[in-house]
Amino acid sequence: MVAARGAKAGLSGKVALVTGAASGMGAAVARRFVAEGARVAVTDVSREAGTALAEELGPNAIFIELDVADGVAWERAVQGAEGELGPLDILMNNAGVGAAGYVEEFDIDVWERSMRVNLLGALLGMRAAFPSLRRAGGGSVINVSSLQGREADVGLVPYVAAKFGLRGISKSAAVEWGRYGIRVNAIFPGLTYTGMTTTIPDHILGRIPLKRSDRPDRLATADDIASLACFLASDRSSYISGAEIVIDGGKSVRFPSSFQDYAPDLTALGFGVEEPAR
Amino acid sequence: MRALGGKNVVVIGFGDPITRAILAEVAREGGVVSAPPVGEVLIVVAALPEPGESVGSYVARIVDGAADAVTALFQAAVVPTAGSIVLIGPPLGSEEVAGFTHASTATGAMRGLSRAWAAELGELGVRSNYLQPGLIATDDGLVSGSVGLLASPPLIRDGGSLGTPRDVAQAAVFLASDEAGYITGAELDVDGGLSESRSSLFSALWAGGFQTATFNPLAR
């Protein structure tokens, strides 16, 4: 599919910065952007994986180490990307961390880390990228929220709050930056197969309405997310700003989301925290 | 390969600029415009109300038109291995502007229809999504008479801040294509941010010199 779309060169000549791009969704997006003709700054906290991906992608990709919660690092990253690749046309705030906790019992460190990485990180990124996006004559910002950024879920309040916040900063930027020709949209992925989601029980998968012909389960793939990112980054969506696009196979249509069903194994799902004792 | 390469596409519309732009975009992306009931892609463009038409009969006309098309496709057994439905509401349908009762009501009905189909037809690999156009400028004045009623959308592009029929068509083709293969039950605004700014108050306040104890936007 990458090669098929690549023939179209939908992002030819554009410069993109993608956060959390060393693995998972971010890596799929970086690959697709390069395949579509863009030059891409792969940023991540993981130097080893990020460098390897940039080398794999060839001369149209560079790696820049970036902790999105660090405002100074952001300034350096944008400067570095613009210096090597040119002014940014596309910013994709993809980096995120899982964060579990109940309302009456949560770890303040988990809360603060979620707020810093999942929410502040994207805001710092937009602030740092703004002058570069303006020098590019306008552009497209894509913020990755989550289904839990539209619907609350059990045992995830630090994550839910940050991902809801991401909606707010996306809309704020959309209304403030429209005058500069900078579009800002948010996407809301459902369960996505990234190698960390192999333990989801069948009865959960059965709650996703869309049956796929290309996968045995009903999860999104990182490629699905990359396709949407590519559309939003391209001029084909040049009148779309402030939009919220759910990409979940219809899960949020048919059933209320219920993370409680997987709470026994939050760690296996990549949330990195044990289920809060209750 | 183009986005709709080889797919049979049924477009239900009327002779309006958005429908014409969709037909052109479908062809550009390799789709084969087909007559019902042969097609794995169905794109429905809401007609505009007739003069004097009641809200009820307008909504029924749009909903029944879309539902009849889907039923016909299924009776012909063409869709059910994989397919995609895109419902396109009337421009400004989500703005609840006085005098737009028909459009606002139809928008609600079409959103519900699209989500219900997403839930029901997913098992067959069929996706269904809703597209909401905002202010779309057309050469025959489809919405141009209403432009003065509203603040402009936030997004300003070269050539003006209004959308074009092709903007709507490109988004419709994306939703219809395999690129959007995991998107179903979704709603996509193609409006330049209009729906985010309709209750905007502070931009006028800031422009008028309003400031808070801690934030003076005029100092920016």
Image: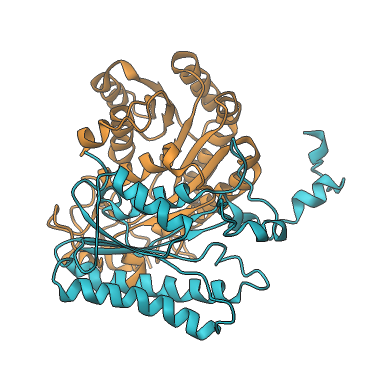
Chain colours: A orange, B cyan
Relative to B49, say whether B125 is above or below.
above
- Tell me residue B66's x, y (percent): 35, 73
| Total numbered badges shown on the rendered structure | 0
Location of residue B37 by image quarter: bottom left
- Tell me residue A228's x, y (percent): 35, 46
State left or right for residue B158 relative to residue A8: right
Residue furthest to the right in view is: B209
Q: Nearer the viewer, residue A92 or B138?
A: B138
Relative to B133, say whether A27 is above or below.
above
Relative to A223, say whether B195 is above or below.
below
Q: Nearer the viewer, residue B85 or A256?
A: B85
- Tell me residue B191's x, y (percent): 54, 53
Q: Residue at x 21, y 64 (%)?
A: A205
Q: Residue at x 14, y 57 (%)?
A: A213
Q: Residue at x 48, y 84 (%)?
A: B57
- Tell me residue B64's x, y (percent): 37, 80
State left or right for residue B11 relative to residue B7: right
Q: Quadrant of the C terminus of chain B?
A: top right
Q: Residue at x 56, y 50 (%)?
A: B139
Q: Nearer the viewer, residue A244 or B178?
A: B178
State left or right for residue B6 relative to residue B86: left
Relative to B113, say whether A135 is above or below.
above
| Residue A271 seen by the camera | no
Location of residue B72 by image quarter: bottom left
Q: Quadrant of the N terminus of chain B?
A: top left
| Residue A95 seen by the camera | yes
